[in-house]
Image (cartoon, rainbow, N blue to C red):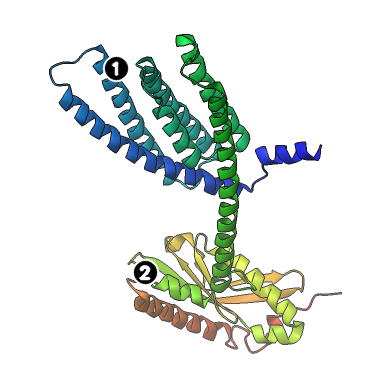
Amino acid sequence: MKLLKRFLRYMNPDIDPKVIRDMDRQSIRNIHIISVILMVFEILALIVFLYTHIGHFDHDAMIVLISVSYCIILGLTAYSLSGKMLKKNDLPHSRFFLFKIVFYVAFFAWAMLVDYRHYRAGDQMMTFYIVNLVTVCFILFRPWIGAILVTCVYAGMFTALYTLDGAAGIQPLNYIALALASMASNAVRYLSLARGSSKAVRLTENNQDLENTSRHDGLTGLMNRVALEEDAAKMDGQKMTVYMIDINYFKEINDQYGHVAGDEILRETSRRLKHLFPSGHYYRYGGDEFLVITYRPAEENYGADTYDFVQEEYGVKVLLSIGNAQGSPKDEHELFDLISRADKALYVTKQRTHSAEFGGHDRRKHIQTPQN
């Protein structure tokens, strides 16, 4: 029973979808390369064939011409489709699987017809076995699927030859051994590449995690100054609006309610900014300052220079001061100049919100203690 379970796991292993996606793309890349090689060889063969058969085309020559042309068209089609698939990152596994099956069947159909003709002429069957070797090495199928496909093509080839002359030129035991070897090779290669892809996917995920950690603020999840420096180097002259946002009297909030409350207010502020400035790039600029860069028209963003909300858990009324500037920076220096202009606009807003006229002299008007 244990051996049966192990065999079933071997034939149908449980593999992470991300690993399967990586293996699918490997198979499609291999088909892309195989298609080019196939076209080159067949085009050369076509040139030689046409040169050697000038003026004496017969029935057999026409069959060869059709066979070579079919192979060239197959290679061109597979090359074009696989190239398009490789450019898309969101294709489902079923699309990759269907493409592999169609290519496999079309490839083997050509090989079987070619070697059927060779067998009738008393020549060796080479194309069928070469195609079998290529597919086992470069096109990945789950072991149980590979076993079914190999069984079908070997049985189909043998049946065709058996109807011709009882397959007299085939040694059944050798033929079966080759089929079993193909199944085993497909399974071993699939599982080996699954392990390799699994390691590659984990490494990629770890690298992405490290990159995200280095580029994002751990408290708010917004991007940090490191990310801003990197993004600034990518400026290309697009029109944008830059917003500098500051939490008024944040130190007093921390002093009165504690740093846990202050941290929650920072997180809530980051969430509010995504609502006020949709589709923006959000950065924690430092301490209680935030930076938002948006390419949307200014009228589609929040237009006032202040915004307030109540942090429900602690009952604190939070007031944000906002300054903005518009421009089309072509490099990082122009971007930081734009940020500096927005920071100056923020300073003007803070002067007003911190003034006695606005109530800034009395902190109690900005921090409300929840009523019992």
Q: Which mark is on residue 235? A: 2
* Percent of width and height locating residue 173: 57, 24
* Percent of width and height locating residue 53: 17, 21
Nearer-the-camera pick, 337 or 367: 337
Task: Say which amino acid is labelled 1.
Answer: Ile
Q: Which residue is mark 1?
A: 63
Nearer-the-camera pick, 40 or 96: 40
The correct choice, above or below, for 127 with respect to 253 in the image is above
Q: Residue at x 57, y 87 (%)?
A: 355
Q: Which mark is on residue 190? A: none
Task: Say which amino acid is labelled 2.
Answer: Met
Quarter where residue 116 is shown: top left
Q: What is the CA distance from the residue labelled 2 to the residue labelled 1?
A: 60 Å
| Number of other residues with Cα within 10 Å of mark 1, as a class: few under 14, some 14 to 19, many 20 or more | few
| Number of other residues with Cα within 10 Å of mark 2, as a class: few under 14, some 14 to 19, many 20 or more | some
Quadrant (top left, top right, bottom left, bottom right) of the C terminus: bottom right
